[in-house]
């Protein structure tokens, strides 16, 4: 990977980071609005909510989406950290050590596995390593 390619990936990561933060901020606003309208129950976590009504289901859905975005944000932050601190290591598959293709990094700039390893992990059903 040359400097120009790295710059491009870094820009992609920063763009994704901004849009993920915006999505999370929206969720946050919506949570707050609901809580302010609610009965003073402060917990955001579905398991603490009474199991009744569509509001709860909607909140659970939001929570799941928000946590997905939250996980993505962590992936993006980690990729940026590697890119800044250990640029030579960036883009290497964590499983087999090969360079992840630029095509893949362009689509998923925070990818930690090459496409072969990712497919193998998905086929094996071990999502924790994905
Ligand atoms: Zn690999």
Image (cartoon, rainbow, N blue to C red):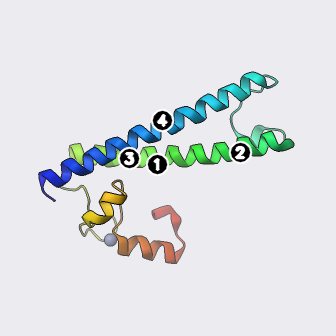
For marks 2 and 4 on the same chain, the one whose residue lies earlier in the sequence? 4
CB at disc 2 and ligand 1 closer than 8 Å: no
| Residue at numbered disc 4 | 22
Residue at 22% in and 44% down:
85
Q: Secondary structure at mark 2?
A: helix
Q: Secondary structure at mark 1?
A: helix
**CA distance separating discs 4 and 3:** 14 Å
For marks 3 and 2 on the same chain, the one whose residue lies earlier in the sequence? 2
Specify the label residue 49 is tagged with: none
Vertical arrangement, residue 63 with respect to residue 1, above or below: above
Would residue 95 be visible to someone looking at this image? yes
Specify the label residue 60 is tagged with: 2
Vertical arrangement, residue 12 with respect to residue 104, above or below: above
**CA distance separating discs 1 and 4:** 13 Å
For marks 1 and 2 on the same chain, the one whose residue lies earlier in the sequence? 2
| Residue at numbered disc 3 | 76
Residue 106 coordinates in the image, percent (x, y): 30, 58
Q: Secondary structure at mark 3?
A: helix
- The crowd level at tag 4 (other Cα within 10 Å; few <14, some 14-19, many 20+) is few
| Residue at numbered disc 1 | 72
For marks 1 and 4 on the same chain, the one whose residue lies earlier in the sequence? 4
Residue at 46% in and 36% down:
21
53 left or right of 103 in image = right
């Amino acid at each position: 990977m040359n400097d120009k390619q790295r710059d491009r990936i870094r820009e992609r990561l920063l763009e994704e980071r901004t849009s993920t933060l915006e999505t999370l901020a929206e969720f946050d606003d919506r949570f707050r609005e609901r809580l302010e309208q609610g009965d003073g129950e402060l917990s955001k976590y579905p398991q603490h909510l009474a199991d009744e009504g569509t509001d709860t289901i909607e909140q659970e859905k939001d929570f799941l989406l928000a946590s997905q975005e939250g996980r993505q944000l962590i992936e993006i932050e980690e990729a940026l950290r590697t890119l800044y601190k250990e640029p030579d290591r960036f883009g290497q598959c964590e499983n087999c050590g090969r360079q992840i293709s630029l095509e893949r990094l362009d689509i998923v700039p925070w990818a930690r596995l090459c496409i072969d390893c990712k497919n193998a992990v998905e086929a094996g059903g071990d999502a924790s390593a994905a």
